[in-house]
Image: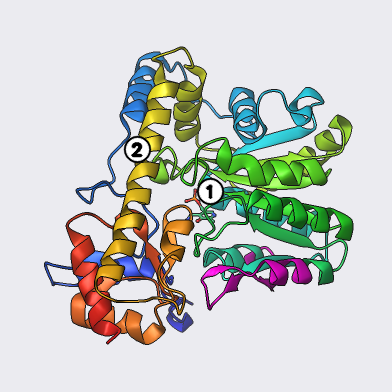
Amino acid sequence: MFNAVQPAPPDPILGLTEAFRADPNPAKINLAVGVFKDAEGNTPVLASVKAAEQRLVDDETTKSYMPIDGSPAYGKLVQTMLFGADHDILANARARTANTPGGTGALRVAADYLSQNHAGATLWLSNPTWANHHGIFNAAGVETQTYAYLDPNTNALDFDGVLAAIQDIPAGDVVLLHGCCHNPTGVDPSLEQWKAIASAVAERGILPIVDFAYQGFGQGLEEDAAGLRAVAAACGEFLVCSSFSKNFGLYRERVGALTLVAQDSDTADTVISQVKAVIRRNYSNPPAHGASVVTTIMSDDAPGGLRSQWEAELAAMRDRINEMRSAFKAGLDERGVNLTPEGNDFVTQQNGMFTMSGLSKDHVAALRENHAIYIVGSGRINVAGMTPTNLPVLCDAIADVMQ
Ligand code: PMP
């Protein structure tokens, strides 16, 4: 039977990493995959994570199964990170959280939940969006459509386009909003724009899903939750897909969460029962390690404890990315290279690991063929992969291919 199987196309992003590994050029640079790197180009385990893992080694008493939706302590903690401890959603027990394998797991569980409980609802995704979004939802049988997002002349938000698109989405459909650090553009709405988007979504009767994979990578843990909290203020029902891959550096441990918020606690119980049914049939119950690390760190909130250590490590990652943004813009300016007709200011106005550079497919191909520099075909560059060493090489190469 296997002889008739055709090979699947390579994943657009992970496939590039395979091509990068195979490239013999010693000066090659990988700015494709979305992984934070330090100034030496490494992705180390955070010291707070190492300390938490040591505690787990010493104190863990069982490897028996987790509950289908993970540990209640983890769920509470995720909700507190999302909304703040005093939020009405927590006070009235309107949220339920399932620990999922990564943000991808949260999205896939959300997709299966939608297809099994809201048949016929279409999911609306920003254009562009993270390459895997369409695939995850389509694989679960949820149809996807796109809404306008980026103004190509300025590489800034096409706010009027977003609002107009939302006003055309039929009631009963679902819209995915990136909580912060939009992937792949780095372009986020301002708080005022978030409020307007959230009101439009509420008025239309559309269910929002907030994909929240970068909390703390933009402006700060609380600041980055402002958009989500604007959605919470306007919309009585929504889903949140969290990932702790980036902000805890726990990529391979697969730790994330699906949080549902309902109008009241009884409805939340009903909806989580359906989410748990989805999980049971999919992976049964989540891996424990990553979530235990997050719980250990976040619960140690005394001064000088693991939580403050982690917050300092997170701030250092965020600061390094922002330093690279400034240095990248300066490097382009010095070489007289303009990535948009309006210059390069957009680079420092965007948030998070990525910038949509505006480089064309031909530029991307020339960077790879002539300079062994790997970026995604759409022109997305991982700013968190830039280092003081590779940055001048990158800027020279961009100046070369844009000549
Ligand atoms: N959503 C977005 C927007 C992402 O960028 C990513 C990771 N690249 C994910 C979800 C998935 O996160 P995880 O690696 O935790 O599955």
Residue 337: percent from left, percent from top: 31, 76
Q: Residue furthest left?
A: 26
Residue 389's spot in the image, x, y percent?
17, 57
Where residue 319 sits: x, y (%)?
A: 36, 43
Image-quadrant location for residue 66: top right
Q: Quadrant of the C terminus?
A: bottom left
Q: Which mark, by number, is residue 316?
A: 2
Whether 45 is drawn above or below 155: the answer is above
* Whether residue 399 is situated above or below residue 71 in the rendered picture: below
Q: Which residue is mark 1?
A: 213
Q: Label 1 sits on what residue type? A: Ala
Query: What colour scheme was applied to this rendering of the protein?
Result: rainbow
The reply to whether residue 368 is in sight is no
The local secondary structure at tag 1 comes to: loop
Which circle's residue, 2 or 1, is located before the other in the chain? 1
Q: CA distance from mark 2 to mark 1?
A: 18 Å
- Horizontally, is 323 left or right of 276 in the view? left
Please tell me whether mark 2 sits on a helix, a strand or a loop: helix
- Residue range of the region highlighted in magenta in the rendering: 139-165
**Residue drawn at (49%, 47%) of the image:** 218
Q: Residue at x 50, y 38 (%)?
A: 220
Residue 13 belongs to the span the image colors magenta? no
Relative vertical location of residue 75 with respect to residue 368 in this rendering, above or below? above
Residue visible at 63% across and 28% down in the picture: 80
- Tell me where residue 302 appears, x and y as whole percent: 47, 12
Report if residue 377 is visible in the image. Answer: yes
